[in-house]
């Protein structure tokens, strides 16, 4: 069965304290691995798409990487405005465009 | 680019009434749209996949007759919650795929908060 697991469930960081969020996935064939940011009461905001192992993408303080079993979202020198829930989702090659979502990591960055 | 809107953003209705939520892709055509439900501090739960011009595909456990989905055009999908009850209160989010070759990313709307009293 296709499955996506995120860890940790919640993370508190001091401003400037770098860390990584993990997304482990099991899908029959990976079409894409997606990262989103979600603020309370809002819809998810697209961050990155990764398609193949070894691929990396960067945006400001965020960097996403992909292996054959997991993806990492690295946050370098985070700021309080990076506080949000980060969601990853896997899309399989099964013929539909459905996402399999992880449960998310709630990040809190303290000033 | 790739902006998705939802209307209304918040709605309060009485038990037994029906509520319609609209999802529009503003700057692209979307052959496929999705409807999700999200409970507090939980991830998104897929309710159904909506394809333009055809019947929606519902996930297991989602009542088709209660959650009516219509995808009448390439930029509009609607979700109607029929005979709403307090347990239907939730945050409903739609997403859309541009459908361009190689672009499988879902772009999400801002969500609709439904409260049934």
Image (cartoon, coloured by chain):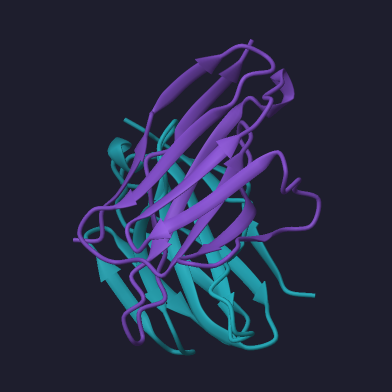
Residue B14's place in the image compared with B60, above or below, is above
Which residue lies at the image location 42% right of the left edge and 49% below the top edge? A44
Residue B116 in sight from this viewpoint: yes
Asked if residue A69 lies left or right of residue B102, the reply is right
The location of residue A21, given as percent across then percent down, is: 51, 59
Which residue lies at the image location 36% right of the left edge and 34% below the top edge? B7
Foreground: B73 or A22? B73
The location of residue B97, given as percent across then percent down, is: 39, 67
Which residue lies at the image location 47% right of the left edge and 20% below the top edge? B11
Q: Colour of chain B?
A: purple
Foreground: A53 or B15? B15
The location of residue B15, given as percent across then percent down, is: 68, 14
The location of residue B5, given as percent across then percent down, is: 31, 44
Residue A7 in sight from this viewpoint: no
Foreground: B31 or B110? B31
Q: Please tell me in which quadrant of the rendered image residue B6 appears.
A: top left
Image quadrant holding the C terminus of chain B, namely top right
Residue A46's place in the image compared with A79, above or below, is below
Say how many tags the image has.
0
Image quadrant holding the N terminus of chain B, namely bottom left
Asked if residue B42 lies left or right of residue A35, the reply is right
Q: Please tell me in which quadrant of the rendered image residue B116 appears.
A: top right
Which residue lies at the image location 54% right of the left edge and 33% below the top edge? B91
Q: Chain letter for cyan?
A: A
Foreground: B92 or B84? B84
Residue A22's place in the image compared with B93, above or below, is below
């Amino acid at each position: 069965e296709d499955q996506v697991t995120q860890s940790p469930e919640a993370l508190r960081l001091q401003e400037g304290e770098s860390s990584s969020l993990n997304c482990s996935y099991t899908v029959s064939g990976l079409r894409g691995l997606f990262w989103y940011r979600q603020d309370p009461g809002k819809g998810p905001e697209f961050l990155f798409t990764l398609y193949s192992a070894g691929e990396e993408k960067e945006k400001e303080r965020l960097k996403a990487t992909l292996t054959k079993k997991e993806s990492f979202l690295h946050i370098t020198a985070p700021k309080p405005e990076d506080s949000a829930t980060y969601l990853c989702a896997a899309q399989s090659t099964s013929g539909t465009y459905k996402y399999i979502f992880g449960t998310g990591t709630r990040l809190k960055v303290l000033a | 680019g790739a902006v998705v809107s939802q209307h209304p953003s918040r709605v309060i209705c009485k038990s037994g009434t029906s509520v319609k939520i609209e999802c529009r892709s503003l700057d692209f055509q979307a052959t496929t749209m999705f409807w999700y439900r999200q409970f507090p501090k939980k991830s998104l739960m897929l309710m159904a996949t909506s394809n333009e011009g055809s019947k929606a595909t519902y996930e297991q456990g989602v009542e088709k007759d209660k959650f009516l989905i219509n995808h009448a055009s390439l930029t509009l999908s609607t979700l109607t919650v029929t005979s709403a009850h307090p347990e239907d209160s939730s945050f409903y989010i739609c997403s859309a795929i541009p459908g361009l070759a190689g672009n499988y990313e879902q772009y999400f709307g801002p969500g609709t908060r439904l409260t049934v009293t």
